[in-house]
Amino acid sequence: MQPPGLVSLLTIDTLSGAAGRDLHRVLRDGASTVARTADLDVVAFLGPERVPATGAPGAPRVGVLALVDRDGVHPPRRARVPLPGPVADRAPAPWSPAAADLDDLGPRPLPRHLLGLPVLGHGQHLGWLLVGRDATPVDAREPDLRQAVAGLAGALLQGLADLVERLAPANPLPAGSASRRSEQLRRMTALLSRTATPAEIGRRAPRELARIMECSSAAVYLLDTGGRTLRGHGHPALPPELAHLADVGVDDDHPVAECVRTRTPGHVTRERARRYRAFQGLDPAGLGGILVVPLLDRTGQVLGAVNVNWTQDGYRPPEEVELVTSLARQIAPALERAALLTAERRAVAALADVAATLQRSLLPRRLPTVAGVDVAVRYRPASGPGQVGGDWYDLLHLGPHVVAMIGDVQGHSTAASALMGQLRTVLRAYLSEGHDPAEALLRTNALLLTMDEDLFATCCLVRLDPRTGSYEVTSAGHHAPLLARDGVIEELPLRPGPPLGVCPAARYPTALGRLEGRSRWLLFTDGLVETRDDPTAGLSRLRELLGHPGLHREDLAEQLLRHPGTAAEDDTALLVLDVETATAPPPPAVAGRSLLEAALPLGQDLGAAGRARAFLRRVLTSWRALPVLDEAELVLSELVTNAVVHGGGASCLRLRFERGRDRLTLVVQDASPTLPAPRTADEDALGGRGLGIVELVAEEWGVTTVTPAGSGKAVWATLRPAAG
């Protein structure tokens, strides 16, 4: 015969069975999770062995069911340690590591700071969760510890409760009652596992309580955020004349309020109910037996109360009281978990709102209106909670040109978003100063390398002249734009330079060309085409949609974002440009200055000079600048040949013509930083006269170094038509 209140719970020998193996897995995994989450040096589950018979000397002993420390997971041990107090004591209790009986708890010395947390379930005290830390004391109110223990509670308590049922309790229930009660508890566990918020628990738990207890009504009262009012959720709902009883003040004269204040269960008979002010004026015949049980979290803080009502007056049998108490102990940790999840969701939603606001503030609020250019832009934030991305777009109107930008900073963080805003501002500044796209990227890269940032960025710039159809495209590690014209979709043959902030000696080649008529450009970031397994999975879909001639740019942008296969966890930016270029040559010069520009990429072969002359003739014809053609062909041939022979290859040719001044500027860029030097050639020499010819024919000429230093130069010459 065992003393009442000290029941036979767990035996080490029994853990060798199937139930024991399952329990060991739950305990082992749970201890590892708690240790990792709360940064603990040791986590142990201690379960009581059989209690000594009445009058037997000695305190109850417990065995080590699971132990996790910094060395890993250890198997169960037969080591015995004393409970910190009576088994019925359910409050967290500090344990002293100096106690001799704790020496054999594990294979290594215990931490300095230990705390015992009671493991409760099935109406019984199932054991202790012992946690310890060397560096700092362990407080049961630590948020990480509370969250870890609350997250473990459902699986652990159900596993322990199932095992208790199999081990035959000291005070056996009538035949069939044990299995029936276990089934009732399992039903409540299943219901609570499907609830996600405290309000949902309040709505669903009372119905299950009433069904399990076969009572006339049941209610769950939950403390509101202010901690002064208990909001009642009952089944069935109160009739209108009793609706005022749904909410109870903590200080009210009401059995539920009294239970919450005292944190103890209580019976209320019909006679006693008349003493409560809340029930005065009610028909006594409508009152029966009432059982109220507090809902306490793992630190002993009250969450509310469970209220069960029967039509029969009087006290309920002990097994029913125990069952309601067990159900309340299932509801309480479920409320804790639901409250944590609700708070987490609110925090995530708030963070997402902050992230979206920050992102919107760093993108342009409005885009310029440019004749001949229609624009559609979209931005889709990352799908992860509260993630701030580094994708951006922009559009500038600079004189006759429009410059479209698309970019992506590495990572998803406020640092990435802040750097995105800085880069966008820097690029706008360099472009507004008159630097061409390649030069703007060079300068931005040099600046980023001095900013001591751990992030890098990709970027693509497109400069268009909608009057002439000329374009320049340059990229820093970014996807090349897609171009649609006459039903043909092409990806520009662009050789991108390295991302910004990676290489001090970076160069950014430029692809140049000229378009006539209608064209559609699509600039985008990788979130539009990448999947987890394939970085180009969405390109075929982009080509298909871009090839739709009748699809409006806004509809195209919407459909691109709705593409189901792309990486929604990454943010995405896109920019669609519809460009209308006049097919006729520019009109004759008018009063005032008018600047025309054109560019052509050149190669490293000797044929570059011929291609440059053909391009010059074609452009000057369209510009109606033929009076300067002969001198320009001569100077251009010398500049390009000099770049190919001595400069490692001519990378590009730029033409600028000022109508009002009839002034033509030729610019040839090469990869060598060595400045050209005029030479004195002998009469029989085959070379050495190039710069002399340039100096003789050109109005002026010079050399400009390319930033950063050492990455090349640009040789330029200006010409005017001969007078007369």
Image (tube, rainbow, N blue to C red):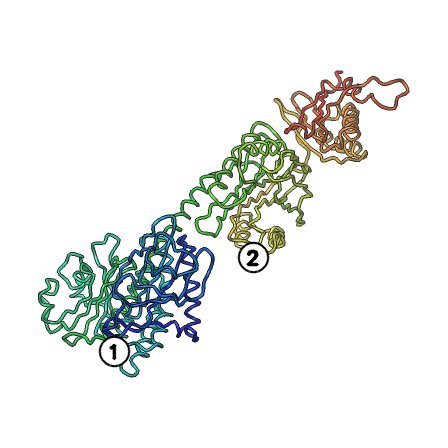
Residue lying at the far top of the rendered structure: 724
Quarter of the figure that contains the N terminus = bottom left
Give the mark count: 2
Judging from the image, what secondary structure is the residue with disc 1 in? loop
User: CA separation, marks 1 and 2?
Assistant: 68 Å
User: What type is the residue that disc 1 sits on?
Assistant: Met
Instruction: From the viewer's perspective, tell me whether residue 264 is left or right of residue 482.
Output: left
Q: Position of residue 476 (x, y in %)?
A: 62, 39
Q: Position of residue 321 (x, y in %)?
A: 22, 72
Judging from the image, what secondary structure is the residue with disc 2 in? loop
Quadrant position of residue 68: bottom left
Q: Position of residue 394 (x, y in %)?
A: 53, 38
Q: Note whether 240 is above or below 515 in the view shown.
A: below
Among the two numbered marks 1 and 2 on one chain, the one whose residue lies closer to the N terminus: 1
Residue lying at the far right of the rendered structure: 684
Residue at 22% across / 59% down in the picture?
230
Residue at 12% across / 63% down in the picture?
278
Pointer 1: what residue? Answer: 1
Quarter of the figure that contains the C terminus = top right
User: Which of the pair 300/376 is nearer the observer?
Assistant: 300
Instruction: From the viewer's perspective, tell me whether residue 670 is left or right of residue 404.
Output: right
Pointer 2: what residue? Answer: 565
